[in-house]
Amino acid sequence: MRAYNFSAGPAILPEHVLQEAQAELVDYQNTGMSIMEMSHRGKEYSAVHDETIANIKELLNIPEGYSVLFMTGGATTQFALAPMNFLGNDQTADYTNSGTWATKAIKEAKLIGNVNVVADCAKEIPTRVPTIEECTLSENAAYLHLTSNETISGAQWKTFPKTDAPLVVDMSSDILSRPLNIEDFGLIYAGAQKNLGPAGVTLVIIKDELAARCPDTVPHIFRYQTFIDNNSLFNTVPTFPVYMLCLVTRWLKANGGLDAMEAQNQRKAAKLYDAIDVTDFYSGTAIPECRSDMNVTWRIANTDLESVFLEEAAHENLKTLKGHRSVGGLRASIYNAFPEAGVDALISFMKEFEARHG
């Protein structure tokens, strides 16, 4: 029996996708080879590569003038690449700080150029994301950067600000969980290992005209324009993670697309937050209007019971509910692939646990 895996990342994948990958692992489409063994320039992989790009464009309704790229290094690498490509010597980049991952992005950007932290709520308890009204934006900023969903604190941007500066967003933990108006963004990047597939590939969606800003002194491998010009095949692409991403995008399309995912994700999260709020035994850690639909974070009033909760939950096949090591507490990551039945099972366990220990 498969566990209900609440891991924040690498995270649960659709069981159908795993089964499909298993069936094709040794002999991909009667070629006698695994997709992992094939040239990234061969016709079999090229078909997967192109289909994945087409599926992402369809799911997000990406217009002309934008490119879908496959890179490596996760969001952590993008923390450096965005300012390397977009932040000129005489410019300032605006950053919002909403938590751990935004803090890391700011730290890297400061190594490249001038950074203005326009709003900082990273250390506030309960947790939240900034409002655009509180942001002290720079005049003629190179871009505005934000982290759409903080996996550690469980805080999420529900709507995105509209500014004159290009909007650059780390969407690692909520990409493809809801529809977006892509034209509102200059750059979106997302490590795959939370809501897209296995670790190893980074999805980048970029406005083509923005890529042209890159200084000539940046090495070619670090330029978005290089990946645009070469269809992400400047060097060897992580073929198996892209193949898995292809299967996930097929699954998304077959299950109603992003409108259906958003409705399902909101329903799952609402159930779990209701179970937390109905009692004083548990308490959520993010303010209600910023609560993440992807990563639900909470504490037990008697924090000594949290280790007991985790141990007993694991015995009930409810796995990886421990909060991030930097903050502790409890966290349920309920991405697209996480079944609603698993949320129901967790809620039942929470009620039983409170009855025994409350």
Image: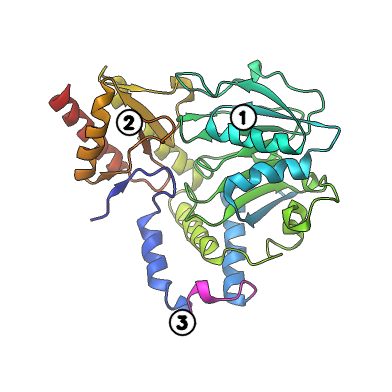
| Disc 2 residue type (three-letter) | Leu
Residue occupying image coordinates x 40% and y 66% = 20
Can residue 230 be seen by looking at this rendering? yes
Q: Secondary structure at mark 1?
A: loop
**Which quadrant, please, contains the N terminus?**
bottom left
Residue occupying image coordinates x 46% and y 82% = 30
In the orientation shown, which residue stands out farthest toward the left? 356
**Which quadrant, please, contains the C terminus?**
top left
- Magenta part, dominant SS: loop
Question: How many numbered marks, from 0 up?
Answer: 3
State the residue position of label 1.
160
| Residue 257 location (% of width, % of height) | 49, 48
Q: Secondary structure at mark 2?
A: helix
| Residue 52 location (% of width, % of height) | 57, 60
| Disc 1 residue type (three-letter) | Phe
State the residue position of label 3.
30
Q: Which mark is residue 272?
A: 2
Quadrant hosting residue 213: top right
Tell which of 273 and 39 is nearer to you: 39
User: What is the basis of the colouring in this image?
Assistant: rainbow
**Magenta segment: does it hold 243?**
no
Quadrant hosting residue 111: top right
Quadrant hosting residue 295: top left
The boundaries of the magenta stretch are 33-41
Q: Residues within 10 Å of mark 1 (few under 14, many from 20)?
A: some
Residue occupying image coordinates x 62% and y 32% = 146
Which comes sooner in the sequence, label 1 or label 2?
1
| Disc 3 residue type (three-letter) | Asn
| Residue 238 location (% of width, % of height) | 57, 63
Mark 1 to mark 2 CA distance (whole Å):
25 Å
**Magenta segment: does it hold 37?**
yes
